[in-house]
Structure formats: C-alpha cells, structure tokens
C-alpha cells in the first residue's frame, strides 16, 4: 500500500513537472506567433503607406504643371510665398505629434490595452485641436501684418483663405498617429490620395474660374488646400 502511494505520488510529480515545463513552451510559441503577425502587419502597412505616398507625390507633381501654365510666373510667385509662413505655423501647431501618438498607441496595443490607446488618441486630439485653433486664428487675424512684413499686401487674403487648413491638418495628424499605432496604414494612404485629388481638381477649377484675375485665381488655388485637408479629415472620420 505504501509502495502504491509512493508510485502514485511519483506519477503525480512527473505529470506535474511535465505540465510546468509545457507552459513556457506554449507561451513562447504564442509570443513568436504574435511577433510574426506584428512583423507582417508592419511590412504590409509600410508597403501600403509607401504606395499611397508615391501616388500622392505623382498627383502633386502633375498638379503643378497645368497650374503653372495657368497662373504664370507672377501667380506662382504669389502662390509660393504663402508656404514658408504656412509651414512654420504647422510646425508650431505640433503636427509632429503624430509620431509620438503612433508610438504611444502602438505600445498600448501591444499590451492589449485598447481603452488606454483610445485615451491617448483623445488626449492628443484635444491638444492638437487647441493648438490648431490658436494658430489658425494667428493666420486669420495676423495675415495682413505678415503680408506687410513680406512686402506684398496681396498675401493677406491668401493667409486668411489657408488659415482653416492649419486646424484641419492638426486633427488629421492625431488620426494618422492613432491608426498608424494600430498598424493600420490604409486610412493614411487613402487620405493622402484623396487630399491630392481634391487639391488638383478644386485648385485647377477655382483658378480657371477666376481667371484672368491672377490674384483671385491664386486665392482659388490656395483655398483648394483648405478643401483638400477637409476631405482628408473626412476620410479618417468615416473610417
């Protein structure tokens, strides 16, 4: 009887020891599978994002050719003068937040903390909304002053036309970071393509509509930027 108990106990110890050895093996295999899935998702996302960016670049290059022919050197000069200040304002608006949001969301999604990832997105959206509103108002209200400093009073109207796009770009930046953190690059690629399509179509149409008045035609092309950013934001909102 004692021998049977000893044998049974030995069998239980052996069975238990096998059980404890198998758990790490199963866990390791699961982790490897998860890492492989994340790696594949990252590679696929990189391909989708690169393809979307490539198409958007082609559309942007195609857009400049007929726009230059339509506006001429003076009109394109006015058009180009807006962008140095516009780029500076976008930088001040924290557009680079998208990278930080992407990393923070990715870290929480890897730990399967979906609710915390959404909180990161919500916080970023609020911060970027405030920054976007402030900097949009700066362009809207201070556009004439900036134009005088640049030595061309016609730029004041252009700054007012492009000012809403600062807020829109900020909001788009938050959405980009959130979706990229989730390894979903399709919305970003689609928004880039839609943005360029609208800018091309609306820009050429509005410029043609206001010709031969060069200043108004340039204003139409600049306002097309605001329209295109609105469409890009709408793509994220729908998805």
Image (cartoon, rainbow, N blue to C red):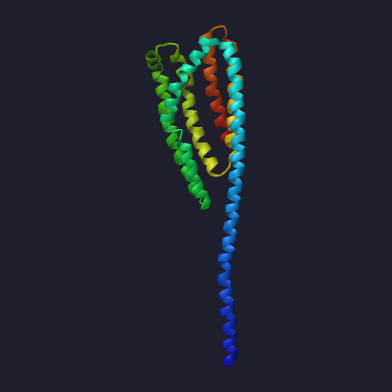
Q: Quadrant of residue 159?
A: top left
User: Where 159 falls versus 4 (above or below)?
Assistant: above
Q: Residue at x 58, y 78 (%)?
A: 14
Quarter in which the C terminus is drawn: top right
Question: Residue 57 placed where, x, y %?
Answer: 59, 27
Q: Is residue 140 above or below residue 25?
A: above
> Is 109 left, or right, of 194 in this rendering?
left
Q: Residue furthest top?
A: 212
Q: Is residue 110 above or below residue 52?
A: below
For the residue pair 205 and 239, the one nearer the viewer reads as 205
Instruction: State which quadrant residue 55 falls in.
Output: top right
Residue at left offset 47%, top offset 41%: 101
Residue 210 drawn at (x, y percent): 57, 10
Residue 20: x percent and y percent? 55, 71
Observer-nearest of 2 and 133: 2
* Count of residue discs: 0
Q: Who's the residue at 58% across and 18% down the image? A: 64
Q: Residue furthest bottom?
A: 1
Q: Position of residue 202 (x, y in %)?
A: 59, 19
**Whether residue 21 is situated above or below residue 54 in the rendered picture:** below
Does residue 85 appear anywhere in the picture?
A: yes
Where, quadrant-wise, is the N terminus in this rendering? bottom right
Q: Is residue 156 left or right of residue 14?
A: left
Residue 190 can be seen, yes or no: no
């Amino acid at each position: 009887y004692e021998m049977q108990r000893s044998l049974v106990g030995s069998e239980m110890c052996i069975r238990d020891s096998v059980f404890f050895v198998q758990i790490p093996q199963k866990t390791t295999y699961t982790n490897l599978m998860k890492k492989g899935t994340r790696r594949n998702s990252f590679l696929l996302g990189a391909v989708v994002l690169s393809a979307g960016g490539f198409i958007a670049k082609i559309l942007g290059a195609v857009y400049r050719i007929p726009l230059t022919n339509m506006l001429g050197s003076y009109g394109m000069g006015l058009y180009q003068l807006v962008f140095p200040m516009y780029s500076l304002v976008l930088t001040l608006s924290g557009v680079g937040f998208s990278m930080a949001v992407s990393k923070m969301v990715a870290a929480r999604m890897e730990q399967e903390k979906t609710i915390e990832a959404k909180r990161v997105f919500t916080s970023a959206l609020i911060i970027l909304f405030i920054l976007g509103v402030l900097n949009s108002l700066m362009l809207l209200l201070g556009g004439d002053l900036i134009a005088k400093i640049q030595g061309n009073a016609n730029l004041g109207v252009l700054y007012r036309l492009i000012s809403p796009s600062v807020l829109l770009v900020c909001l788009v930046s938050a959405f980009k970071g959130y979706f990229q953190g989730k390894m979903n690059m399709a919305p970003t690629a689609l928004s880039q393509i839609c943005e360029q399509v609208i800018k091309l179509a609306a820009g050429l149409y509005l410029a043609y509509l206001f010709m031969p008045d060069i200043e108004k035609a340039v204003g139409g092309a600049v306002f097309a930027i605001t329209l295109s950013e609105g469409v890009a934001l709408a793509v994220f909102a729908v998805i």
